[in-house]
Image: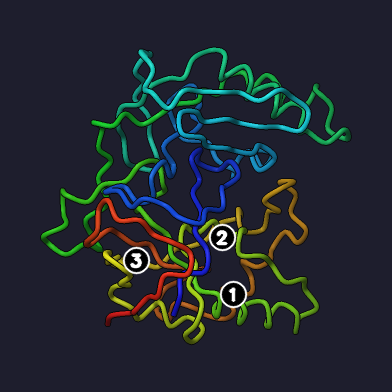
Amino acid sequence: MKLSTLACYPVKSLRGIALSRAELTERGLAFDRRWMLVDDDGRFVTQREIPALATIGVELSSDTLRLVHDRMAPLVLSLDEPKAAVRRVRVWQSECQALDEGDGAANWLAEALAKSLPESLPAPRGEAGRFRRLRLVRLPHEQRRWVETEFLPPAERGVVHTAFADGYPLLIASEASLAALNQRLEAKGEAPVPMERFRPNLVVSGGDPFAERDWASLAGPGYRLGLRKPCKRCKIITLDQRSGEAPSAKEPLKTLVEMDTQPGWKGAFFGQNAVVEQGVGAILRVGDVLDSLS
């Protein structure tokens, strides 16, 4: 098998960045989910609530993060941590401290999201005002968000941490599994879906469809990743990751449930959540030869 795709999502629920190489850190790929949007209560906000987040692009340079929108000048933030207000934030049931990127970033995001509203949904709908209450926050280097312990071996409990990902440092998906899903979708008269709908960090080519559910670890040159929990999917996989629109409101969620891709688990599953077992500091490269360990 080979590593066919690498992707990083610096701002949770904004567009991702395709990479040819990436550094592996304790939290997964460098800069992955380092930033996110929160509401007045510090609760995370994603495409589940605001599909228009998919219209905002992200670029990384050696010293800046840039948010881009086709109807606005970019927002440029230094990668150096700001001297900023500290906020208590929450991702699902997990809480931690984060740094607020300031009014300028919040105002830019509000304007970009308001411009992304369909013309058929004018301002009286109230969305623009709601966007003004969103804040962009960053996870400080020293802060820790611990991974849930239920699916970790004892040695990893209270040790493995992540940034603002839903729960785990990495998400791994398989080209063969996507091909099987798309074959089923097309047989039903539905359009196939691209891998970007699932927002994985690593995509593996080769192997059998859904074989990844039986892997304990995935090893590459100088690193080993432990697969810990199947990824239960939500409505985000129904959204086009450029427009935020849903071409088919129930697909591919409905078909994943029908395929029972994770026997014994209720719901729609695609991909596997993973942790870093070995290789912090290693460089992952597209084309790496990978071995699965059971």
- Residue at left offset 36%, top offset 21%: 87
- Residue at left offset 66%, top offset 37%: 56
Residue 9 horizontal side relative to residue 85, left or right = right
Question: What residue is disc 2 on?
Answer: 198
Question: What residue is disc 1 on?
Answer: 178
Residue 80 horizontal side relative to residue 57, left or right = left
Alpha carbon of mark 2 to alpha carbon of mark 3: how far?
Answer: 15 Å
- Residue at left offset 55%, top offset 75%: 175
Residue 205's spot in the image, x, y percent? 51, 77
Q: Are marks 1 and 2 in contact (CB under 8 Å)?
A: yes
Q: Give the mark, 3 or 1, whose residue is nearer the N terminus.
A: 1
Task: Look at the image and name its color scheme.
Answer: rainbow
Question: What residue is disc 3 on?
Answer: 229
Up-down relation of residue 105 to residue 283 (above or below): above
Mark 3: few/some/many CA within 10 Å (<14, 14-19, 20+): some
Instruction: Kindly report which numbered mark, 2 or 3, lies closer to the viewer in this rendering.
Output: 2
